[in-house]
Image: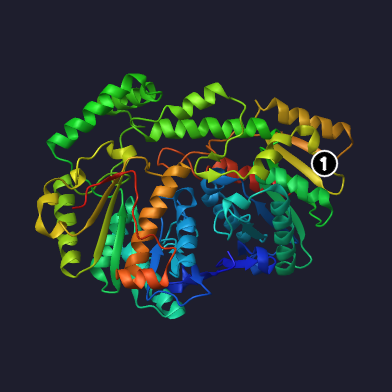
């Protein structure tokens, strides 16, 4: 079934989305909202989530993909990117999906910073997802910013035959500095401050919905965070999951864009 | 972005293609609109979202644009209009012109093509008289012996200190000596179908045809792939042909192939944005100064300008 590109949200802050209606003869009582990652990770996973949405749609699950304001195909400048606005975008997307799939229970699938924003938005109480599927959520903003910086420097080293060593030198001299840009995306002052303040303790889950956390087996901090939430009696489960998707690389032929194991894992996560 | 409207569209055969129209609302739009599309497997927003940034910049100057996915790429469904990828790309570009013509009322187009999009842009321009300008980034390059020597020498001198050197050297050895399955392209996949000579002949013939039809051409080359340039080096012998003398040529030393840095993006946007704006409004200086005070009329670029 043909997907529908659309704009939604308040006039002053429209965002772009693509709605994949459920195939009529198989329609389920579930709908999925996909919360994409930030910056290059979001661009890198565009195709992955498009294919996932098509698969879900074919199995009777209406799905909405969208781009946060100032990212992807949405209006807005990257300099306006920050958590509070993005959290509101996510709730607008939830309402849009509810309008297009009335009566369906809505599951949020969030990846990386999109998963973090899903936790923050669900906690606000403005929308009512029945389940969060959090794929490698960012729970430590400084660590995430450092990773983006390292990948940025690696990208510069790789792309330029004669790279500007100032990038690598700056990383060595100030390893904990929050970057103003990473992999072609600007980080606003507000976003940098929010990343600096983002720690596992600032992301408590609520009991309003189920949560499934998908993390790499070597991500001990994420496992610890999930365990902490369980000890608070929150309905959360942890699933270990390794995949071949490189979050920040360019879409080169030798880098998997839509790894089948990841597709299958996320598709299964809707109901498990 | 209050001064622009953004309208997602589905178009083309069976509505297979998806794109985003960006148009100014507070001023009369230019008579020429800009088309942007995929670079490789990146979806229509372009590498590092550069197409969106360019679309916003152009709309603020009064230029409408359509960024879209070719059939089978990004959000667009595959077209079955031809077995040839290049022909299908031309069909996608022509469908984009059709929908932009209907929705924007423009009849002429400037196309921005990056990397793999260069060949598609040139082929569409050759096939369709509605194309009046093409901006081509990191497309065909034919450096001659002196330019190749200088490039390779600079690379070699920088290699020992290059952080990526061990990995690149390993991959080079694997490619050239081991011939392992992982480094040898499968027949028909990721493999050049045309020889370098065929490429040069196609580029030369197509470019000459565009110039004779008075299609404006901008040729841009990144510093990450080509390292250095002493004046139209990437055109090789074609740079001495009379029909290439009127083309705008720029080597952008600080810009990389996927515009990964903010500085590189600024340089790219200024160069392409100014050039496309000029082509869309016509290159009259009087018109520029009267109607578009923000459009750059100076090119204070810290990069090498090789155009005469």
Residue A15 in the image: x percent, y percent?
63, 62
**Disc 1 target residue:** A205
Left or right of residue B226: residue A149: right
Left or right of residue A227: residue B294: left
**Residue B229 versus residue B191: which sits nearer the camera?**
B229
Q: Identify the residue at image location x=57%, y=40%.
A: A261
Residue A83 in the image: x percent, y percent?
70, 48
Left or right of residue A197: residue B50: left
Its colouring scheme is rainbow
Q: Identify the residue at image location x=31%, y=68%.
A: B285
Secondary structure beneath dot 1 equals loop
Q: Quadrant of residue A227?
A: top right
Q: Is residue A130 at least partly visible in the picture?
A: yes
**Residue A266 versus residue B279: which sits nearer the camera?**
B279
Q: Is residue B1 above or below residue A107?
A: below
- Please give the count of numbered marks on the rendered protein: 1
Q: Is residue A185 above or below residue B248?
A: above
Q: Is residue A111 at least partly visible in the picture?
A: no
Residue B80 in the image: x percent, y percent?
37, 66
Mark 1 surroundings within 10 Å by alpha-carbon count, few (fewer than 14), some (14 through 19), many (20 or more): many
**Residue B46 versus residue B133: which sits nearer the camera?**
B133
**Residue B43 versus residue A231: which sits nearer the camera?**
B43
Residue B39 in the image: x percent, y percent?
39, 52
């Amino acid at each position: 079934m043909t997907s529908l590109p659309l704009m939604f949200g308040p006039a002053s802050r429209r965002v772009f989305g693509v709605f994949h209606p459920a195939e009529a003869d198989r329609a389920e009582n579930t709908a999925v909202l996909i919360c994409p990652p930030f910056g290059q990770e979001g661009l890198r996973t565009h195709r992955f989530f498009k294919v996932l949405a098509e698969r879900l749609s074919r199995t009777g699950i209406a799905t909405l993909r969208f781009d946060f304001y100032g990212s992807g195909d949405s209006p807005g400048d990257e300099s306006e990117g920050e958590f509070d606005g993005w959290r509101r975008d996510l709730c607008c997307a939830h309402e849009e999906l509810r309008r297009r799939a009335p009566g369906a229970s809505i599951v949020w699938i969030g990846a990386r910073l999109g998963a973090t924003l899903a936790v923050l938005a669900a906690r606000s109480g403005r929308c009512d997802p029945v389940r969060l599927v959090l794929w490698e959520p960012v729970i430590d903003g400084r660590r995430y910013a450092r990773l983006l910086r390292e990948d940025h420097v690696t990208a510069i080293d790789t792309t330029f035959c004669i790279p500007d060593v100032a990038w690598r030198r700056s990383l060595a001299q100030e390893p904990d500095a929050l970057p103003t840009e990473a992999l072609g995306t600007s980080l606003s002052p507000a976003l940098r401050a929010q990343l600096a303040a983002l720690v596992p303790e600032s992301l408590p889950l609520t009991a309003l919905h189920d949560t499934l956390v998908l993390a790499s087996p070597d991500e001990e901090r994420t496992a610890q965070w999930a365990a902490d939430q369980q000890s608070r009696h929150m309905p959360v489960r942890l699933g270990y999951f390794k995949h071949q998707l490189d979050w920040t690389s360019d879409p080169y032929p030798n880098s998997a864009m839509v790894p089948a194991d990841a597709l299958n894992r996320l598709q299964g996560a809707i109901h498990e | 972005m209050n001064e622009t409207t953004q309208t997602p569209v589905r178009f083309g055969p069976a509505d297979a293609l998806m794109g985003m129209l960006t148009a100014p609302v507070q001023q009369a739009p230019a008579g020429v609109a800009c088309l942007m599309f995929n670079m490789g497997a990146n979806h229509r927003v372009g590498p590092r979202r550069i197409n969106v940034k360019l679309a916003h910049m152009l709309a603020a100057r009064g230029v409408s644009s359509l960024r879209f996915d070719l059939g089978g790429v990004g959000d667009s469904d595959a077209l079955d209009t031809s077995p040839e990828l290049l022909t299908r790309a031309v069909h996608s570009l022509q469908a984009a012109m059709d929908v932009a013509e209907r929705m924007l009322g423009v009849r002429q187009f400037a196309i921005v093509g990056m990397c793999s999009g260069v060949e598609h842009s040139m082929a569409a321009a050759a096939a369709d008289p509605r194309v009046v300008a093409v901006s081509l980034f990191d497309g065909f390059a034919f450096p001659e012996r002196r330019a190749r020597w200088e490039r390779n020498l600079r690379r070699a001198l920088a290699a020992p200190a290059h952080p990526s050197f061990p990995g690149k050297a390993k991959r080079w050895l694997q490619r050239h000596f081991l011939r392992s399955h992982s480094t040898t392209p499968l027949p028909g996949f990721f493999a050049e179908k045309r020889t370098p000579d065929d490429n040069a002949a196609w580029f030369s013939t197509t470019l000459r045809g565009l110039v004779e039809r008075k299609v404006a051409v901008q040729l841009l080359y990144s510093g990450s792939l080509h390292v250095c340039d002493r004046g139209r080096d990437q055109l090789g012998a074609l740079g001495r042909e009379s029909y290439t003398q009127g083309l705008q040529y720029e080597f952008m030393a600080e810009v990389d192939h996927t515009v990964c840095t903010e500085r590189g993006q600024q340089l790219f946007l200024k160069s392409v944005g100014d050039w496309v704006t000029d082509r869309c409004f016509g290159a009259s200086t009087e018109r520029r100064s009267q109607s578009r005070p923000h459009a750059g009329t100076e090119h204070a670029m810290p990069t090498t300008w090789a155009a005469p």
